[in-house]
Amino acid sequence: MLKTALRATGFAVALSLAPLAALAETHRVAFHVDQNDPQVMNMTLNNVNNLIAYYAEQGDEVEVQVVTYGPGLHMLREDTSPVAPRIAQMALEHENVTFQACNNTLQGMQRQAGHDIALLSEANIVPSGVVQLVTLQEQGWSYIRP
């Protein structure tokens, strides 16, 4: 009889905690990088890690897009990225973090260089970095410019 009462109590506790799981949120955050500055790039990656850690402690999920354009595209270039190892590590650790590369900027850099420019394998090309940021904000994503 005691075992039955304990099982019933455990079941009641589990049911009472179920609404807490339903309260977990998914936060969607876009980070904007438009500077070829290793300090800004590292600060962005630090901010992403801190954001993920904070919300994980709260039991919430986070989706992050790091959107690069203009001189910030160097963050995602194979030949010039000062943070390539960190990006590779973050992509392995956090499946909900993606890195967006502006195609307008890429095309301009390639025209200027006179050859194709390779991006990190973690980079996703979007037509326009600015349009990507606008689209995400219109969809309710939070916007951060470190």
Image (cartoon, grey):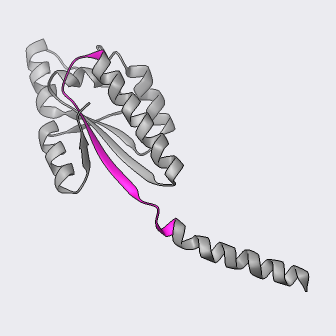
Which residue is at 68% across, 74% downward? 13
Q: Is residue 11 magenta?
A: no
Residue 23 horizontal/vertical position (percent): 46, 66
Which residue is at 74% across, 74% downward? 10
Q: Which of 6 and 71 is in front in this view?
A: 6
Q: Quadrant of residue 14?
A: bottom right
Residue 144 horizontal/vertical position (percent): 25, 39
Q: Confirm whether residue 28 shows in the render.
A: yes
Q: In this view, does 47 lie to the left or right of 125?
A: right
Quadrant of the snapshot with the C terminus: top left
Residue 33 horizontal/vertical position (percent): 23, 29
| Residue stretch rendered in magenta on the structure | 21-38
From the viewer's perspective, is residue 26 above or below residue 87?
Answer: below
Q: In which quarter of the image is residue 3?
A: bottom right
**Residue sticking out furthest to the bottom:** 1
Q: Nearer the viewer, residue 24 or 119?
A: 24
Quadrant of the snapshot with the N terminus: bottom right
From the viewer's perspective, is residue 72 above or below residue 91?
Answer: above
Which residue is at 26% across, 48% downward? 142
Residue 35 horizontal/vertical position (percent): 20, 22
Q: Confirm whether residue 121 shows in the render.
A: no
Q: Is residue 22 left or right of residue 64?
A: right
From the viewer's perspective, is residue 91 above or below residue 38?
Answer: below
